[in-house]
Image (spheres, rainbow, N blue to C red):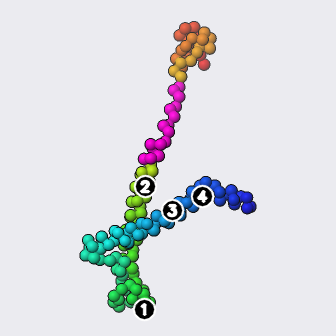
Amino acid sequence: MWKEFKEFAMKGNVIDLAVGVIIGGAFGKIVTSLVNDLIMPVVAQLTGKVDFSHMFLALDGKTYQTLEEAKAVGAATLNYGNFITAVVDFVIIAFALFLIVKQANKVRALTAPAPAEKPALPATKACPFCQSEISIKAVKCPHCTSDLN
């Protein structure tokens, strides 16, 4: 059983998947920082300095100045600002991955070998009786008039 597990774990696609997950986690941190530290402040400036992360609705009907204050007293909240930020995160990640895959496909197309051409089918054959060169579609030899199968 240990041998089978070791063979499974050491397969190339399992290792590739592990590397992809690790790089994806690191890439996610970069994108989150990009959204929170660079893009959302610009969006907030364009929308009148609205900070999406502090947008919430308290379900107990009371008014709280900050989300932290509402959480401190145990009030249930709908944190729609965090949801907006998560949607922006997703759109940016999806767009970044689109650009990466698009570039990778271009590079792959440039480095990929040209597809092998299929060999052309012969247009002629030899008559089995007189050995003359005749059309592949012939059913009767024009030289010796033999019937061909």
- Determine whether 46 is above or below 100 in the image: below
Q: Earlier in the sequence, mark 3 or mark 1?
A: 3
Pick the residue in front: 86 or 60.
86
The label shown at residue 73 is 1
Q: CA distance from mark 2 to mark 1?
A: 45 Å
The label shown at residue 23 is 3
- The three-letter code of the residue at mark 2 reads Ile
**Image point 42% across, 51% down: which residue?**
103
Q: CA distance from mark 2 to mark 4?
A: 21 Å
Contact between marks 3 and 2 (CB within 8 A): the answer is: no
Query: Alpha-carbon neighbours of circle 1 within 10 Å: few (<14), some, or many (≥20)?
Result: few
Pick the residue in front: 3 or 134.
3
Q: Looking at the magenta stretch, what is its main secondary structure? A: loop
Q: Which is in the foreground here, disc 1 or disc 4?
A: 4
**Image point 52% across, 17% down: which residue?**
135
Contact between marks 2 and 4 (CB within 8 A): the answer is: no
Q: Position of residue 33 (x, y in %)?
A: 41, 69
Specify start and end residues of the magenta stretch as a single range. 106-121
- Determine whether 26 is above or below 126 in the image: below
The answer, for residue 80, to whether it is visible in the render is: no
Quadrant of residue 50 in the image? bottom left
- The three-letter code of the residue at mark 4 reads Ile
Q: Which residue is mark 2?
A: 100
Q: Which residue is mark 4?
A: 15
Q: Earlier in the sequence, mark 1 or mark 4?
A: 4
